[in-house]
Image (cartoon, helix red, strand yellow):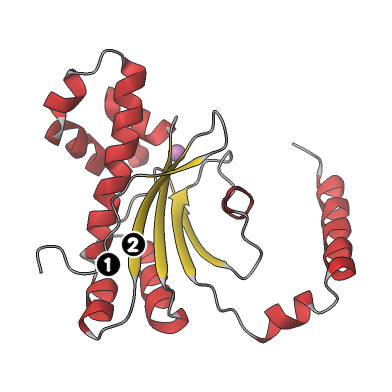
Amino acid sequence: MPDMKAIFAANREWARSMCESDPDFFNRLVSQQEPEHLWIGCSDSRVPVNQVAGLQPGEAFVHRNIANIVSIDDLNCQAVIQYAVEILGVKYIVVCGHYGCGGVLAALRGQATGLIGDWISSIVALREQHATTLAALASEAERHDRLCELNVIEQVRCLSETEAVKTAWSRGQALRIHGWIYSIRDGLLKDLHASIDGPLGG
Ligand code: CO
């Protein structure tokens, strides 16, 4: 990791280059933020949201945690969702997982203890729910990949059941939830075709 001096130097250079290419850039951002996307991703340092999705500052409202989990009991995540949907009026929510996720691997192996063990317990439950599918796969690497995908699909479902999202749909607000996965092997995003734009079963 670069030392602190290098980070500040890089920051000054970035701000300078942004002003050079678009003199009004910071003035526009100061006055308001109007992102169309809420992005829920993993805290993993290899998945920098704006870079991998080609989004500029101001274009995505972001929430990240270990293994991109959406929990009804997580006040932080729920407040982010409410703010994004009700105040910012985002049109899309993307849950983006990634292959090679350490949180998912810990759940697959049943290894994590303490706070992290508590945090990923819902993925351990998901592993049990899909035990037959996972057992049919030939290797741990394939089981890991599949559980990363299943986790994204499950979080899309959880999002569709949050109060803010259900309320938005009930008042006719256009809001679509997508489930994507990112590969740290080649830098590419993949759509898991788990999109939802209204209440499940209704
Ligand atoms: Co991860």
Q: Quadrant of residue 80?
A: bottom left
Q: Is residue 96 above or below residue 124?
A: below
Q: Is residue 88 above or below residue 79?
A: below
Residue at x 81% of width, y 41% of height:
3
Name of the residue lying farthest toward the left: 201
Q: Is residue 146 left or right of residue 95?
A: left
| Along the line of sight, the residue nearer the viewer: 76 or 198 | 198
Where residue 86 appears, as percent x and y from the top left, is: 38, 82
User: Disc 1 versus disc 2: distance between alpha carbons?
Assistant: 6 Å
Q: Circle 1: is it few (<14), some (14-19), or many (20+) Cα within 10 Å?
A: some
User: Which amino acid type is marked by label 2?
Assistant: Ile
Tell me the number on the disc at residue 177. 2
User: Which amino acid type is marked by label 1?
Assistant: Asp
SS label for mark 1: loop
Name of the residue lying farthest toward the top: 138
Q: State whether label 2 is within 8 Å of ligand 1.
A: no
Q: Is residue 6 above or below residue 198?
A: above
Q: Earlier in the sequence, mark 1 or mark 2?
A: 2
Where residue 73 appears, as percent x and y from the top left, is: 26, 60
Q: Quadrant of ligand 1?
A: top left
* Residues under numbered marks 1 and 2 in contact, where contact means CB atoms less than 8 Å apart: yes
